[in-house]
């Protein structure tokens, strides 16, 4: 048995997959009484009802001729769903009580107080001064108004109210009552900051990669997706905290969240940064064009790709840009326009001769520099000739394992090595991020590509599914991109892989993956096949299928660069 491992918690309630091998394609397998197909090499996968709480195990019976082998494979189940019934003993979903954990907020800032409890309970917030506020069950309140909502719009058991942080700061208590039953929950970790105190923090995370590529991640919600990639060393005002996430202000109209471990609080009373954008210059070099905007202190910012324009939004910046000089006679950067969008947000629009190909925000001696990369010259007859392609064999660390125990990092390296050979035969220079089984940190891989001058970054993986998804309908070939400028590459590589491998076309996906976030080169992450599917795991062991995977990716690269070359010739 490979998955789920014995004793693991199955993260599904209805059905889940189970896979492993019996070592012989002539054997038959039954799991919990259900016959399971076995492929030629003896491996199998099944999608079966999750075993009941009374018997949380898979009973596996394998037979070949007169031989029978039995295995008992225990698992753990998710805790049963709470039943918040209207009758019987009062049951409250204690895990749902919010706020919980350290929270630093502004006085008057509304904090959501909520929990899940039966619809016919009475839920009260008791404050330190003895006063009370009722929590409201929104589903019940809307029902009483006959406001029609869809059946699943509102969790019928959620009770909530929004309370000012200063009201909660002295300590409060949630009281749930029904009949003679009462449950109480202390709310004691809400703190309100002194309104006269301004906290400045410096972004100090992102270590482990060189300075040019070192970024600190900010998120729109605590523990949410990565949205802003800022320079280490940027100074921001901290305006709150939830658990181990710190809220920072980018400008008067925008706040975001940073991991507490990525920021260092500066001494009290220290003056914050003043950032004024001065006169800008456009400086052309052979392989790129720099747009240099002095701002005095590192600004928080965002770069957006919009058609043939790069939009650079600088937060907490007043633009006082009187002159923009274009040094040299260059055709890539046509115009730089700027706008003061709000009193502390500046917007630079950099119009290019064609859609952006790659760029790199940099900080250099008091100036923000957006380095905009030129497209490579493409030989129409041999589109990869002279280009540098960086091939990344996915994992280790981490990665998936197939039914016979094949570890993803083994075939990804074999496929990557075949891809290298094919790309070199088609005229490219190929740099591999790894050539051995040794682990290589995730964050460094795209940086190695940038340092190698990659014209494209290709990451080779084999896919797997999370618990609860039916593997028989959700497997096939997929490609992933992040920046809009990488989308054409993902489409071509996807087309190439589907044609060569003939698996189900799952399409391309926007996904915020480490391998894809570096903006210097077009990047694609290939999930050519599923290692958890027995036939596909068996295929990726073969040189023939590895060759097809690699040929599909190489075909996609050729098609992408051929199209890019046409774009350069016909601006
Ligand atoms: Zn992977």
Image: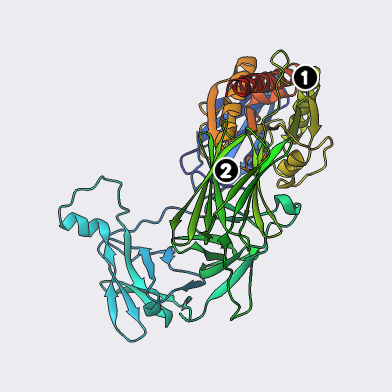
Work out which quarter of the rendered image holds the C terminus and state it.
top right
Q: CA distance from mark 1 to mark 2?
A: 29 Å
Ligand 1 placement by image quarter:
top right
Q: Residue 464 appears in which quarter of the rendering?
A: top right
Residue 432, compared with residue 344, is above or below; it is above
Q: Secondary structure at mark 2?
A: loop
Find numbered disc 1 in the image and state the secondary structure of the residue it sits on: helix
Whether residue 175 is visible: yes
**Mark closest to the chain's N terminus, 1 or 2:** 1
User: With respect to residue 266, does 354 lie above or below?
Assistant: above
Left or right: 422 with respect to 367? Answer: right
Q: Position of residue 392 (x, y in %)?
A: 74, 35
Farthest residue to the bottom: give it: 129
Q: How many neighbours does mark 2 have within 10 angstroms: few (below 14), some (14-19), or many (20 or more)? A: some
Give percent across and percent down for residue 545.
71, 18
Q: Image quadrant of residue 487? A: top right
- The quadrant where residue 108 appears: bottom left
* Residue reaching furthest to the top: 381
Q: Quadrant of the N terminus?
A: top right
Viewer-closest of 549 and 535 = 549
Residue displayed at 67% across by 60% down: 366
Q: Nearer the viewer, residue 29 or 544?
A: 544
x and y percentages locating residue 359 in the rendered image = 64, 41
**Which of the labelled discs sits on residue 512, or is there none?**
2
Q: Position of residue 49 (x, y in %)?
A: 49, 36
Residue 518 in sight here = no
Q: Which mark is residue 422?
A: 1
For residue 317, the mark is: none
| x 34%, y 58%: residue | 84
Task: Give 154 or 283, whichever is nearer the viewer.
Answer: 283
* Dot 1 alpha-carbon crowd within 10 angstroms: few under 14, some 14 to 19, many 20 or more: some
């Amino acid at each position: 048995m490979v998955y789920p491992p014995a004793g693991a918690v199955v993260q599904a309630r209805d059905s889940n997959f189970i896979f492993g091998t019996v070592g012989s394609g002539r054997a038959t397998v039954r799991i919990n009484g259900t016959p399971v197909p076995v492929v030629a090499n003896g491996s199998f996968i099944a999608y079966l009802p999750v075993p009941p709480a009374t018997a949380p195990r898979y009973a596996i019976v394998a037979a070949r001729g007169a031989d029978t082998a039995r295995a008992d494979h225990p698992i753990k189940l998710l805790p049963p769903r709470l039943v918040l019934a209207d009758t019987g003993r009062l049951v409250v979903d204690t895990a749902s009580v919010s706020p919980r954990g350290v929270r630093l907020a502004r006085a008057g800032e509304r904090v959501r107080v909520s929990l899940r409890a039966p619809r016919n309970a009475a839920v009260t917030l008791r404050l330190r001064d003895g006063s009370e506020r009722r929590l409201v069950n929104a589903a019940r309140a809307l029902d009483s108004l006959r406001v029609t909502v869809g059946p699943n719009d509102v969790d019928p058991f959620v009770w909530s109210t929004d309370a000012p942080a200063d009201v909660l700061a002295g300590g409060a208590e949630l009281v749930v009552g029904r009949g003679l039953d009462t449950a109480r929950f202390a709310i004691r970790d809400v703190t309100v900051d002194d309104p006269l105190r301004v906290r400045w923090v410096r972004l100090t995370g992102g270590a482990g990669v060189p300075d040019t590529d070192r970024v600190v991640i900010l998120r729109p919600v605590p523990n949410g997706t990565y949205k802003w990639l800022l320079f280490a060393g940027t100074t921001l005002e901290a305006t709150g905290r939830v658990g181990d996430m710190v809220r920072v202000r980018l400008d008067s109209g925008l706040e975001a969240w940073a991991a507490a471990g990525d920021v260092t609080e500066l001494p009290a009373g220290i003056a914050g940064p003043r950032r004024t954008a001065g006169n800008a210059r456009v400086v052309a070099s052979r392989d790129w064009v720099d747009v240099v905007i002095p701002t005095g202190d590192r600004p928080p910012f965002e770069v957006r790709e919009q058609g043939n324009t790069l939009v650079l939004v600088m937060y907490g910046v007043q633009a006082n840009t009187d002159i923009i000089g274009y040094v040299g006679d260059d055709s890539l950067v046509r115009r730089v326009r700027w706008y003061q969008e709000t009193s502390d947000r500046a917007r630079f629009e950099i119009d290019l001769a064609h859609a952006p190909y790659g760029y790199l925000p940099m900080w250099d001696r008091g100036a923000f520099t957006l380095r905009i990369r030129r497209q490579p010259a493409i030989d129409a007859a041999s589109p990869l000739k002279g280009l540098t392609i960086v091939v990344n064999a996915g994992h280790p660390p981490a990665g998936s394992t197939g039914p016979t125990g094949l570890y993803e990092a083994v075939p990804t390296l074999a496929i990557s090595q075949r891809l290298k050979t094919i790309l070199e035969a088609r005229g490219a220079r190929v740099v591999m991020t790894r050539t051995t089984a040794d682990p290589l940190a995730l964050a460094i891989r795209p940086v190695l590509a940038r340092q190698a001058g990659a014209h494209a970054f290709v990451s080779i993986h084999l896919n797997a599914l999370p618990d609860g998804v039916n593997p028989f309908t959700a497997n096939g070939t997929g490609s992933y991109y992040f920046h809009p400028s990488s989308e054409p590459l993902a489409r071509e590589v996807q087309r190439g892989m589907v044609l060569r491998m003939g698996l189900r076309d799952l399409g391309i996906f926007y996904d915020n993956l480490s391998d894809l976030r570096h903006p210097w080169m077009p990047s694609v992450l290939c999930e050519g096949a599923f290692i958890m599917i027995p036939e596909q795991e068996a295929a990726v062991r073969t040189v023939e299928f590895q060759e097809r995977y690699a040929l599909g990716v190489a075909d996609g690269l050729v098609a992408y660069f051929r199209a890019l070359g046409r774009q350069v010739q016909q601006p």
